């Protein structure tokens, strides 16, 4: 692991000495994307933050309403367990 990290550092230093533009362009693009992520244009995070409902508050509202009876019912099966194949 140490040898691999040393080779990566040597390669980065060599690239910076011979062709610094090759490494600066990806760094500028990454920095721009990071800044746009942290500070989005249009002021989406400026001003008052949006109020979000928690799941507990939404559950308490739904429990106060009367529920409609479910039209499904359980039908008991008539399958015998003795007739199962031997590989089950």
Image: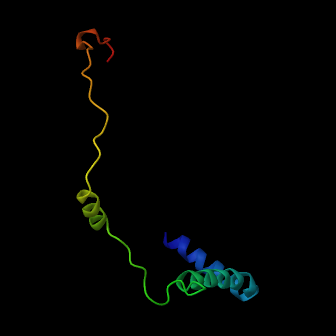
**Could you say where residue 60 lies in the image, as x and y percent from the top left?**
25, 63
| Relative side of 79 to 24, left or right | left
Front residue of 43 and 9: 43
Residue in the picture at 61% in, 84% down: 31
**14 or 57: which is nearer to us?**
57
Q: Residue at x 27, y 30 (%)?
A: 73
35 lies left or right of 60: right
Q: Quadrant of residue 16?
A: bottom right
Image-quadrant location for residue 39:
bottom right
- Residue at the (55%, 77%) spot, across then down: 6
The reply, left or right, for residue 30 in relation to residue 53 is right
In the rendered image, residue 32, in percent from the top left (x then y), is placed at 63, 84
Towards the viewer: 28 or 66:
66
Q: Position of residue 29 (x, y in %)?
A: 67, 81
Residue 33 occupies quadrant: bottom right
Q: Where does the image place residue 36, in percent across and percent down from the top left?
A: 59, 83
Taking 41 as reference, is 8 above or below it? above
- Give the residue drawn at x 75%, y 86%: 21
The vertical placement of 3 against 77, above or below, is: below
* Residue that protrudes farthest toward the top in the picture: 83
């Amino acid at each position: 692991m140490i040898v691999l990290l040393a080779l990566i550092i040597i390669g980065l230093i060599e690239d910076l000495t011979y062709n610094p533009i090759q490494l600066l362009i990806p760094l500028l693009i990454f920095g721009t994307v990071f800044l746009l992520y942290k500070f989005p244009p249009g002021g989406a995070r400026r001003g008052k933050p949006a109020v979000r409902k928690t799941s507990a508050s939404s559950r308490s509202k739904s429990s106060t309403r009367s529920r409609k009876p479910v039209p499904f019912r359980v039908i008991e099966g008539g399958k015998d367990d003795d007739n199962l194949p031997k590989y089950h």
